[in-house]
Image: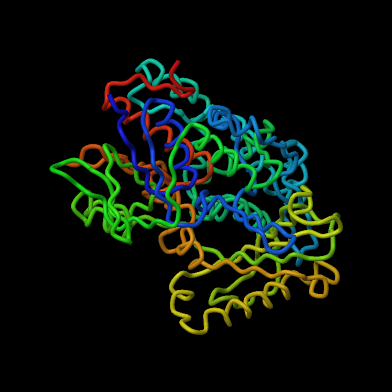
Amino acid sequence: MSRPHVVIIGGGLAGLSAGCYALRNGYRTTIVEHNLALGGVCTAWNRGPYVIDGCIHWLTGGPFTALYDELDITSHVKLRPLDVWQTYRNVEKGLSIPITRDLDALFAELSRVSPVDAPELERVRRGASELLAMSPELDVPELIPWRERLRPLWEMRGALGSLLHFRKTIGEWTEGHLSSPVLRRLFTSLVPEAAPAFFLLMMLGYLSRGQFSRPVGGTAAFRDALARTYQSLGGNVQLHATVDEVLIRGARAAGVRLADGTMVAADVVISTASAPETVLRLLGGRFDADATRDRMERWKLFDPIVLASFGVARAYADQPPLFTLDGVAPRMIGGRRCDRAQVRVLNDDPCFAPPGHTVVQVMLPATYDWWATRGSGYNAEKDIVAQAALELLEPHFPELRHAVRVTDIVTPLTYWSMARSWRGAYEGWMPSGEGAGAHVERTLVGLDGFYMAGQWVEPGGGVPTALMSGRQAVQRLCIADERVFSARGRT
């Protein structure tokens, strides 16, 4: 009896994860990937002797470590725990505050910045410890006994006060509970202003437990380890193959049609493409279209970015690897007002540059429509943005302009053309407003043999979420086929 064939749309982390778990549970798989390489937005690329790392600034461990182990990533990549998550640098106030895992020391420093805010800061510190009980379940609810489903609620009973107090967005909480403008800016630099404030507490809790890390070898090493696992299990890949339609026979997904007309037959289809593209284009709006359009109207997307990277003939060993540059003179860059930026200095791993060199990156806010309407002036605007980014960085990096050897500019259109990220939203839905804690349906009423996975089915996105969604898609597939799911493979 032949093994059922699963076609997976998209070769990013969710697609690779789904492929690995499907193979281990007795399915054949083919990943159909739009780009020339696997990885999706979890990617890095070479520019001369430099590696431009386009994804992992930090990696959340804790309950997610089991995913990295199951997918054999940690067999090939060492995860280096972070003592400092990032640094907040306010030029106007002359402040530089490392966000360290020693929360007692961190909040003592923040209380010195604003003594009047000390009581509220203590609530943050205490809440970061309490909310550690909010551990995500890796398994789908159908596989968790009902008593186990209730256990997290019991364990969270001590954190209800913090959940209620920090239920508003970061922006609303800082405005309503902090007197210091500097602390407001600091906290909204760590987590998007529209995200729930308790997200900040959860992240500080992970940090305090030593559960933030960076993969040695960067994003490329992490991505390549996962791709290696998939291919070692016998998974097939078709690269540079854009899906134009999901084929439907009767009421069941039966494969995909590629842009060149090729038909790829399947018993099951898993789409990791964005929810708007999956539902409205690939399925022609025949399933879940009204709900998807409603989400597009009401839910907020992650803001797109411009990523400006410079390969430089200086080590800049004295700079923190990741910091927010705040308190700078406002300026217009790429159609957006910019008064702060996140800066990454790839000086903590020799994989990124030759000895004595490094890569300096700056993330800038962007607008998809602005970049999409540049027309023939698109490349000229990229050059202008590169110069503006250098002007922003120069006061903090001696001789930077003269040391630049390579310049690389990524825009929201790059995320669309490379990874089909809808409107440049590289992490999908923002976990804010009605999207906070909400879930997108992974199956569609009236369509059998079809599942959705990826950052667009779980507001908040990120590496662990993408991997987990691929795992859960296969769990649901196994339930439908009356198979016992195995994370490690059948014996």
Q: Position of residue 402 (x, y in %)?
A: 82, 75
- Outermost residue toward the front in this view: 1
In the rendering, at what x and y percent does residue 36 appear?
A: 50, 57
Task: Using residue 298 as the reference point, say whether residue 16 is left or right of it.
Answer: right
Residue 454, quarter of the rendered image: top left
Is 277 in front, or is 217? Answer: 217
Structure colour scheme: rainbow
Residue at the farthest left position? 250
Q: Position of residue 309 (x, y in %)?
A: 68, 65
Which residue is painted at 31% across and 53% down in the image? 278
Q: Quadrant of the C terminus?
A: top left
Position of 85 relative to 299 (above/below): above
- How many labels, in total? 0
Q: Residue at x 54, y 31 (%)?
A: 71
Q: On the rendered image, what quadrant is the N terminus found in?
A: top left
Which residue is at a point 65% across and 68% down the rendered structure image? 408
Horizontally, residue 354 falls left or right of residue 169, namely right
- Establish if 381 lies above or below 162: below
Q: For residue 445, say whether it is visible.
A: no
Q: Nearer the viewer, residue 150 or 264?
A: 264
Q: What's the residue at 66%, 74% (across, down)?
A: 386
Residue 473 point in image, percent of width and height? 37, 35
Q: Can residue 304 be seen here?
A: yes
53 relative to 224, above or below? below
Q: Is residue 350 left or right of residue 23?
A: right
